[in-house]
Image: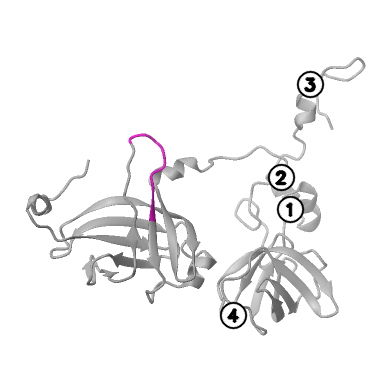
């Protein structure tokens, strides 16, 4: 049930309406962008909603239960503020979206139709389609800790405690050459053992991909220098001379945490937890089953 201001309700009850849709998008970096399907820009609370941005939306559906309500936004890459590279780089991932129904003759007369977050984004040659997920999608996110062999912390976070800025953990390099925007030959990483950066993260500090990053798939050494292969091709071209930083990788195992990082005291997994083979085993004559430690 929507609550409408009396002036807006009276306008909707009239024979002729001047209604348009406005989308307010707030990215994770705090940048706010507005778009409208009206033929002229609209300013609401200091935000300019850009016209002719090529946005269309599917029907808005709402359910009474806890099912996630979705709709699709389709748009052309014809706004100066929409960049294909930014979409591919994930800058818009999980961005907050508000959909307003607005009287364009009197923008103060409006009603919030839906609030949610961007989900899956599909890109084409000249357009994109973005899924808008309702607030109920947060209920699908896991909450709490997982009891498992592997660590459930992220390397370098508050629970892990490893200093990602340490010389032994983080390397800086320059791109010598690249292949398919995914395989990089670089200098500056000769002090690190082969495989040191596998499962780590590379972040470009210069070039067209400055500020963007990706997880490292493979790290090897050759006479030409270090070779780093990432899981996905970067959204923009990687050129010789581009600078980057890359952090060591962690496979979430206790042996790695202790030997590679000297951080066994902060390991957030349960390496001695009995596995399924022990759970489904049965008592055998002569076996010790006194409830004590298995180690």
Q: Earlier in the sequence, mark 1 or mark 3?
A: 1
Q: Is residue 259 visible?
A: yes
Name the magenta segment's main secondary structure: loop
User: Are discs 4 and 1 less than 8 Å apart at CB?
Assistant: no
User: Are discs 2 and 1 less than 8 Å apart at CB?
Assistant: yes
Image: magenta residue range: 64-72
Q: Is residue 34 magenta?
A: no
Q: Secondary structure at mark 3?
A: loop
Residue 159 position within the rendered picture, expressed as x and y whole percent measured from the top left: 62, 50
| Residue found 29% across the figure and 71% down from its top | 52
Q: Earlier in the sequence, mark 2 or mark 1?
A: 2
What is the crowding at mark 2: few (fewer than 14 residues within 10 Å), some, or many (at least 20)? some
Q: Secondary structure at mark 1?
A: loop
Q: Find disc 2 in the rendering and name its residue.
A: 150
What is the crowding at mark 3: few (fewer than 14 residues within 10 Å), some, or many (at least 20)? few
| Residue found 74% across the figure and 77% down from its top | 185
Q: Find disc 3 in the rendering and name its residue.
A: 291
The colouring scheme, among rainbow, by chain, secondary structure or one colour, is one colour
Q: Which mark is residue 273?
A: none
Q: Find disc 4 in the rendering and name its residue.
A: 206
Position of residue 159 in the picture relative to residue 286 (left or right) = left
Q: Quadrant of the N terminus?
A: top left
Residue 259 position within the rendered picture, expressed as x and y whole percent measured from the top left: 81, 54
In the image, 77 versus 148, the foreground residue is 77
Mark pair 1, 3: CA separation: 31 Å
User: Are discs 4 and 3 less than 8 Å apart at CB?
Assistant: no
Q: Which mark is residue 251?
A: 1
Residue 187 position within the rendered picture, expressed as x and y whole percent measured from the top left: 75, 80
| Residue found 27% across the figure and 65% down from its top | 37
State which quadrant residue 19 falls in: bottom left
């Amino acid at each position: 049930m929507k609550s409408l201001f009396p002036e807006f309700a009276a306008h909707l009850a009239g024979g002729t309406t001047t209604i348009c849709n406005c989308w307010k998008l707030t990215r994770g970096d705090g940048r706010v962008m507005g778009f409208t399907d009206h033929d002229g820009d609209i300013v609401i609370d200091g935000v300019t909603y850009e016209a002719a941005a090529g946005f269309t939306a599917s029907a808005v559906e709402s359910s009474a239960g806890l099912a996630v309500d979705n709709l699709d936004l389709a748009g052309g890459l014809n706004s100066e503020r929409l960049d294909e590279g930014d979409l591919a780089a994930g800058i818009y991932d999980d961005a907050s979206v508000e959909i307003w129904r607005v009287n364009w003759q009197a923008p103060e007369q409006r009603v919030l139709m839906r609030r949610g977050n961007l989900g899956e984004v599909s890109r084409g040659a000249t357009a994109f389609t973005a899924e808008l997920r309702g607030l109920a999608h947060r209920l699908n996110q896991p909450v709490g800790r997982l009891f498992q062999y592997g660590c459930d912390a992220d390397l370098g976070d508050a629970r892990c405690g490893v200093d990602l800025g340490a010389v032994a953990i983080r390397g800086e390099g320059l791109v010598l050459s690249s292949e398919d925007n995914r395989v990089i030959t670089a200098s500056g990483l000769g002090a690190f053992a082969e495989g040191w950066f596998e499962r780590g993260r590379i972040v470009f500090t210069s070039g067209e991909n400055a500020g963007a990053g990706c997880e490292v798939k493979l790290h090897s050494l050759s006479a030409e220098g270090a070779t780093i292969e990432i899981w996905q091709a970067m959204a923009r071209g990687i050129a010789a001379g581009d600078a980057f930083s890359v952090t060591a990788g962690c496979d979430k195992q206790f042996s790695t945490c202790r030997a590679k990082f000297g951080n066994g005291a902060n390991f957030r997994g349960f390496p001695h937890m009995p596995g399924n083979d022990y759970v489904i085993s049965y008592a055998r004559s002569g076996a010790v089953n006194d409830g004590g430690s298995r180690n």
